[in-house]
Amino acid sequence: MAPYITKDLADAGQEITATQAISESRKVMDGHKGELFVLDLSFIGWWLLSILTLGIGFLWLIPYVRVTHANFYRQLVGDTYKKAGQN
């Protein structure tokens, strides 16, 4: 979740290093790694179908997976990091 945290804090006007973003990501994901694993497992069929279409299916799958991960992140933290710069 480090890229999402970095983007939120940058939008809030705060500087963050890669190491800090990774540390924050670890805190956010405590107790939620299993949920993300199950979420990723739900895409196995789509990955196989994309392979069967000789890679053409990846044009739709990759954005779908990324948006799903972004929504998972937003569900976990809400606007916590966006509001961090307003304090």
Image (cartoon, rainbow, N blue to C red):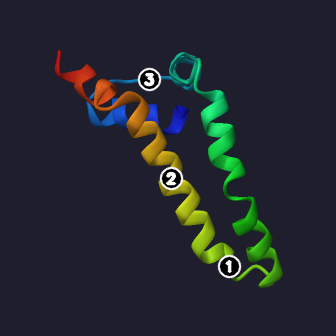
Looking at the image, which residue is at 57% across and 24% down? 29
| Whole-number angstrom distance, CA of label 1 to CA of label 2 | 17 Å
Residue 54 position, x and y percent, is 81, 83
Q: Is residue 14 left or right of residue 32?
A: left
Quarter of the picture holding the N terminus: top right
Q: Are marks 2 and 3 in contact (CB under 8 Å)?
A: no
Where does the image place residue 52, in percent across and percent down from the top left?
Answer: 82, 81
Give the Cα separation between the discs numbered 2 and 3. Answer: 24 Å
Which amino acid type corresponds to the residue marked 1 in the rendered image? Gly
Q: Which mark is residue 57?
A: 1
| Disc sitting over residue 68 in the figure | 2
Mark 2 or mark 3, which is nearer to you?
2
Q: Amino acid at mark 3?
A: Ile
- The residue depicted at 50 percent of the width and 53 percent of the height is 68
Report which residue position mark 3 lands on: 16
Q: Quadrant of residue 59?
A: bottom right
Q: Nearer the viewer, mark 1 or mark 3?
A: 1
Pointer 3 local density, CA inside 10 Å: few below 14, some 14–19, many at least 20: few
Quarter placement of the C terminus: top left
Task: Locate residue 14, reporting x and y percent.
Answer: 32, 24
Q: Secondary structure at mark 1?
A: loop
